Image: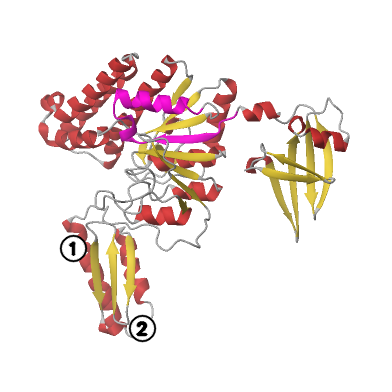
């Protein structure tokens, strides 16, 4: 965030100010702002204030419209040169962007085409790896231990990664341990004849762990210094809701400390696994849900206070509609965080529904770009935009929606009806999408991402009967 500084009649545009540079303290009805200025970057300010040449930094306090110089510092704060070498943005690449050795080369070239950037890279698993890992796990439940090695899904994952390592010319030992552990895990699933949510999260984590190791090794091979990180080892702390965990606030300071400490001691581009975390109670590997790598990227952006978050996909941005349905869909150039979150939640596949929250809280722009067509302008998502010409932003389609009608003739003139209905949903852990009400009925749609079992539907039916019974009583 660039800042214009006004002191003693001097205005100096200072590009190194960021939110993390300021300390804000409310004092009753007054407001106070303390911050530091690296004077090497503002020569006019040094001359106007007659600051000695040996002083590098200036601490300033602003209160009630008055600015006071607190002290001159020689070494405590970072100089302009140090700030200029800090990490600048997040670049997240999805599975299709790193689906093969050739695609990894193209992504590496794309990253190198921005020499002014010092990015944090977030990678998804290669291509269809996650889907094949899940299918392998499901088949292992009933295939028998002796048949695990012959599962075609396991063979797909193994062949894809070994072929990629070979084509890129990097050390195959980077992933051999993971492939062996993957096979042992599938044998364990076959032996137990079940795959719990906790096991499922550990199973799918192998995709990101291998893709990031391969990509980091390739960057180092071509002379771009990189360092691989597993998200669950660097501070991504989550709830223990396996397959759909939430990120906890402790994640942000933990991430900032680890990544900045490593960068300051030995600068190297961080290559971070997407959509993984560590449960705060179990310390087991968790996942943020499908598409959660976007959330990983925005969380890192907020934690480090970076300038921009870039999400590289296989489309030219957020489109006006699904291109598989309408061939003439066009990119939407600008969106607000609220619009993007709404579109994602109601069916748009480009972004994860929860990914906008960290970016909105930190007010960091999110840019959606096409890794297959880097010259396309993409979509920029910010807090606000010009709505004067916006009639319709985009149309999204959500399939397999379950609609439920609840009718009670005793609802007329009653109070507490909605409270009783939604307490039933809370007890059953059911997420409600859209609600419409009349005097005697409620129509609502239920989240189609949930797997509706016969037992759950029966429970829900009993719950609704109980609600109506209470209202009739």
Where does residue 94 sit, x and y in percent of width and height?
35, 36
Q: Is residue 269 left or right of residue 29?
A: left
Which residue is disc 2 drawn over?
Answer: 414
Does the rendering let one see residue 184?
Answer: no
Q: Residue visible at 41% across and 45% down?
A: 239
Contact check, label 1 and label 2, Cβ < 8 Å: no
Residue 456: image quadrant is bottom left
Q: Is residue 148 left or right of residue 122?
A: left
Q: Give neighbour class at mark 1: few <14, some 14-19, many 20+ (Cα, 10 Å).
A: few
Q: How is the image coloured?
A: secondary structure
Q: Residue furthest right?
A: 50
Q: Give neighbour class at mark 2: few <14, some 14-19, many 20+ (Cα, 10 Å).
A: few
Whether the magenta-drawn stretch holds residue 94 is answered as yes
Where does residue 175 sit, x and y in percent of width and height?
31, 20
Measure the C-alpha gap from mark 1 to mark 2: 27 Å
Which residue is disc 1 drawn over?
Answer: 458
Q: Residue visible at 33% across and 65% down?
A: 434
The earlier-in-sequence mark between 1 and 2 is 2
Residue numbers of the magenta segment: 86-114
């Amino acid at each position: 965030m660039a800042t214009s500084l006004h002191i003693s009649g001097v205005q100096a545009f200072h590009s190194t100010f960021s939110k993390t540079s300021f300390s804000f303290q409310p004092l009753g009805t007054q407001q106070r702002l303390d911050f530091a200025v690296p004077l090497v970057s503002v020569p006019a300010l040094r001359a106007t204030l007659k600051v000695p040449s040996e002083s590098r930094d200036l601490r300033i306090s602003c209160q009630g419209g008055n600015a006071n110089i607190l002290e001159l510092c020689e070494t405590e704060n970072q100089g302009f040169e140090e700030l200029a070498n800090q990490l600048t943005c997040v670049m997240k690449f999805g599975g299709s962007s790193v689906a093969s050795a050739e695609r990894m080369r193209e992504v590496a070239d794309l990253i190198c085409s921005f020499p002014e950037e010092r990015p944090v890279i977030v990678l998804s698993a290669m291509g269809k790896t996650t889907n094949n890992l899940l299918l392998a796990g499901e088949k292992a439940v009933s295939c028998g231990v002796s048949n695990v090695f012959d599962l075609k899904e396991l063979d797909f994952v193994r062949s894809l990664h070994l072929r990629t390592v070979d084509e890129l010319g990097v050390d195959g030992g980077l992933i051999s341990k993971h492939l062996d552990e993957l096979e042992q895990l599938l044998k364990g699933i076959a032996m137990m004849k079940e795959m719990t949510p906790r096991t499922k999260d550990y199973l799918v984590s192998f995709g990101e762990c291998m893709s990031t190791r391969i990509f980091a090794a390739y960057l180092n091979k071509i002379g771009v210094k990189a360092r691989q990180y597993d998200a669950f080892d660097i501070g991504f702390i989550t709830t223990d809701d396996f397959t759909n965990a939430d990120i906890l606030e402790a994640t942000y300071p933990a991430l900032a400390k680890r990544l900045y400490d490593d960068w300051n001691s030995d600068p190297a581009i961080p290559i971070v696994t997407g959509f993984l975390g560590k449960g705060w109670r179990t310390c087991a590997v968790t996942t943020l849900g499908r598409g959660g790598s976007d959330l990983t990227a925005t969380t890192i952006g907020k934690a480090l206070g970076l300038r921009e978050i870039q999400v590289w996909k296989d489309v030219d941005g957020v489109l006006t509609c699904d291109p598989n349905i309408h061939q003439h869909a066009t990119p939407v150039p600008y969106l607000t965080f609220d619009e993007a979150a709404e579109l994602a939640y109601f069916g748009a596949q480009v972004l994860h529904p929860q990914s906008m929250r960290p970016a909105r809280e930190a007010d960091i722009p999110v840019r959606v770009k096409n890794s297959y067509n880097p010259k396309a302008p993409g979509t920029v998502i910010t807090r606000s935009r010009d709505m004067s010409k916006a009639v319709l932003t985009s149309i999204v389609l959500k399939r397999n929606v379950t609609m439920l009608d609840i009718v009670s003739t005793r609802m007329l003139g009653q109070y507490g009806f909605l409270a009783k209905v939604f307490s039933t949903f809370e007890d059953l852990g059911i997420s409600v999408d859209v609600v419409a009400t009349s005097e005697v009925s409620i129509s609502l749609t239920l989240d189609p991402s949930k797997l509706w079992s016969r037992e759950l539907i029966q429970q829900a039916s009993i719950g609704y009967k109980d609600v109506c019974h209470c209202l009739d009583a």
